[in-house]
Amino acid sequence: MDEQPIAIKTLTIDGKEVGARSGDTILQVAQEHGIWIPTLCFLDGLTAYGSCRICMVELEGNNRLFPACVTKVYEGMVVIIHSPRLEHYRRVIVEMLLSERPHICSVCVSNGHCELQTMAQLLGVTSVRYPYLMRKHDVDASNHRFLHDDNRCILCGRCVRVCSEIEGAHTWAFSGRGVESRIVTDLDQPWGESESCTGCSKCVHVCPTGALIEKGRSVAEMAKRRQFLPYLTVMRKEDAE
Amino acid sequence: MIHEMLEELGSGIAKEREKTKHEIRVCTAAGCMSNGADKVLGAFQSELKERKQTACKAKGVGCMGPCAGGPVVVTHPDNRMHHKVEVSDVPAIIDSIGAAAYTARQVSTDTPFYKRQQKIVLENCSSLDPERLEDYIAHDGYQGLAHVLSEMSSSEVIQEIMASGLRGRGGAGYPTGLKWSTVAKAGGRKKYVVCNADEGDPGAFMDRSVLESDPHRVIEGMAIAAVAVGAEEGYLYVRAEYPLAISRLHKAIRQAERAGVLGKRMLGSTHDFHVQIRLGAGAFVCGEETALLASIEGKAGKPRPRPPYPAESGLWGYSTLINNVETFASIPAIIKNGGDWYASIGTESSKGTKVFALAGSVTNTGLIEVPMGISLREIVFDIGGGVPDGRSFKAVQTGGPSGGCIPAEHLDTPVDFENLAKLGSIMGSGGMIVMDDTANMIDVARYFMEFSMTESCGKCVPCRVGTVHMYNLLGDILDGKATAKDLALLEELCDVTRTASLCGLGQSAPNPVVSTLQYFRSEYDALLVEEAPAVPAAKE
């Protein structure tokens, strides 16, 4: 049987003409061509979720904004990734995240390794103009190796996705709605008592902030190690083939 | 054969009708039921039994519109309407049949409330028993389905819907025919038809009334859609807060399946269509189509980015047609009378009629159906009877938490999808709340923002956090603690939440604020305070 030909689409990203395979997302194409699109909830190897709204881009001829992580390319698409309007929206979204929970970098184990902090710096968020909501959340220290601190969680859902899609344990899930949303283990039992958790630590290492950490780390000591994810993705793809 | 089957089903009730000279119709929709309509109906039935009157029958019917006057009782065929009927009124009303009117409870129906309405979706509501399939068939029910099954091809049905110009009644107004043809063309082993009955706007009860008053009509609309797009399974997603609608739907589906109207080989044709009911667990966001589909699949009711649209990839990845209750309820009439007939009603861009739930500071609250293009003034002042208690009109809120407030100067605008959007509101599903001059517009905006805030699913950042900040800022303004800077932040939040949110809930959540800022900005400005000095003066 003949191999299916791959349809190629050409599009423009910030004035640069690029080629792409049909079915690719804007983000994939941009990354292949070394064009940076800021992302937060996206993590290569996990299903795109489209929730953080940081990767929103403009498409010429359309008033709406589109999340680059889930929007598929089409022929002749004109994508604008960097514009004053978009930078403004991205900064406000980071401000919203910083104000939602008590993100205080100076006392955080992830200080210096935090993606939210990095994003704020890259986008030039120097202060938060919205009052901090200062909602108090309990810290779950029941697991003997890891710690779950909701005060630092940005609800990106990476832990939920890696646990179900890569580890297959389905330990993490969202509970509640709106600003009351939280990530929970099993049916909101303490992590240490979770029967489904395999203790693989994948959630800890995909977490962009200091919400999921290894115990015994002091301020600024918690660097995440994510090498396993691209490695596993490639291995599984080869297995499938 | 298909038509004969229907005729046979309807023949029983036709004979019954010949024997009955008078009918006492008692509204048994939720509004009147909550005022004791079931007791009134029971009293009529036992009183008639006692008097051994066989030529007169009492029956429960659907919503007749004037919900504030419940329990509503109409005697037929002399067509006398009685409001606020109590069990003690029963003998007197029976006595009045064919004799002098019972004036203590009788109200005139010779008013604009009835004369200005045009009923298509609600045409049978005031005359048929929602719990009897035969009664629906006697009202020409399932004729549209029979016609589609025996005489029309799938593309002819879709052509007819396209010609009607019908647009989705859930709020966004997407052309129904176009949606149907997309699903009809889609591939895949299976297709689904889903009815969105997760009506959640505060002050809106159109879908509930339709489901309670004429459940078979919605089911017929779904069955016609299923035949047109090639689906064999359907879901009715109803919010659990509508127990009466749910029980009537269950009954309707069971009756229709038992009679062979629905289910395997509908009406003896080659088409199968099975409908199941799914209950919403109380999340407003499940009225958003992708969240609704997730909920049917058993997942948490959270929306996902579109595209892909449900027509491409819906329930379990299969192409899915999803329409609102009122949209489906319009279908049988379009098939029966033709698309051109439907297109002759309404405006250039918005065809047909729209059901509104009229509530708030208005004399006649209740359920109304009006042709598109009618002005807001006619709805509020003619049909609604104006603002009571000598108050003056201030604004009308349409579209619930996703809509906006329209002030008096725009009352003459013809109601259609485009015009309402131009005024900063939306058609929405049909909630219409009238406000008098005592209404505080900032409080109104905060009320709706609180609703959006607590109903936000929490998936995307702008909606999850933005609604909370907006709610808090509105509170600060009301408390006289906000400065011009805070108002600027509020406007910025409106813009970001509207532009960057994932689904319709977040994208439209700022509308109540934006529209009140547009028309009642002076009320906001009046509450602002001077900014405090950045550094408090040192104490002596």
Image (cartoon, coloured by chain):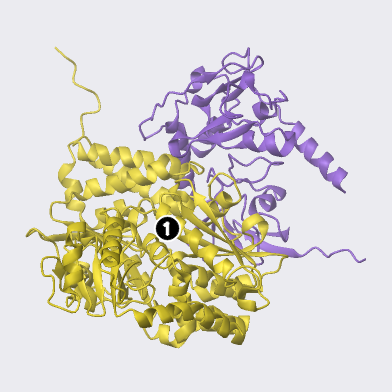
Chain colours: A purple, B yellow
Query: Residue A176 appears at what percent x and percent y?
Result: 48, 36
Q: Are there few (<14), some (14-19), or many (20+) residues within 10 Å of tag 1?
A: many
Query: Residue B356 appears at what percent x and percent y?
Result: 31, 66
Residue B4 placement: quadrant: bottom right
Residue at (37%, 35%) from the top-left corner? A129
Residue at (63%, 17%) from the top-left corner? A143
Question: In what element is the residue under mark 1?
Answer: helix
Q: Is residue B141 left or right of residue B358?
A: right
Front residue of this view, candidates B49 and B278: B49
Quadrant containing the N terminus of chain B in the rendered view: bottom right
Q: Which residue is mark 1?
A: B245
Residue B79 placement: quadrant: bottom left
**Vertical side of B321 occupied by B21: above or below:** below
Residue B346 appearing in the image: no
Residue at (39%, 26%) from the top-left corner? A134
Front residue of this view, candidates A116 and B251: B251
Q: Amino acid at mark 1?
A: Ala
Residue placed furthest toward the left = B390
Residue A17 placement: quadrant: bottom right
Front residue of this view, candidates A157 and B519: A157
Residue placed furthest toward the right = A1
Numbered circles on residues, count: 1
**Vertical side of B56 occupied by B1: above or below:** below
Q: Is residue B12 left or right of residue A210?
A: left
Residue at (47%, 69%) from the top-left corner? B216
**Vertical side of A199 occupied by A234: above or below:** below
Query: Residue B57 appears at what percent x and percent y?
Result: 31, 72
Query: Residue B400 appears at what percent x and percent y?
Result: 33, 56
Residue A5 appearing in the image: yes
The residue marked by circle 1 belongs to what chain? B
**Vertical side of B504 occupied by B189: above or below:** below
Quadrant containing the C terminus of chain B in the rendered view: top left
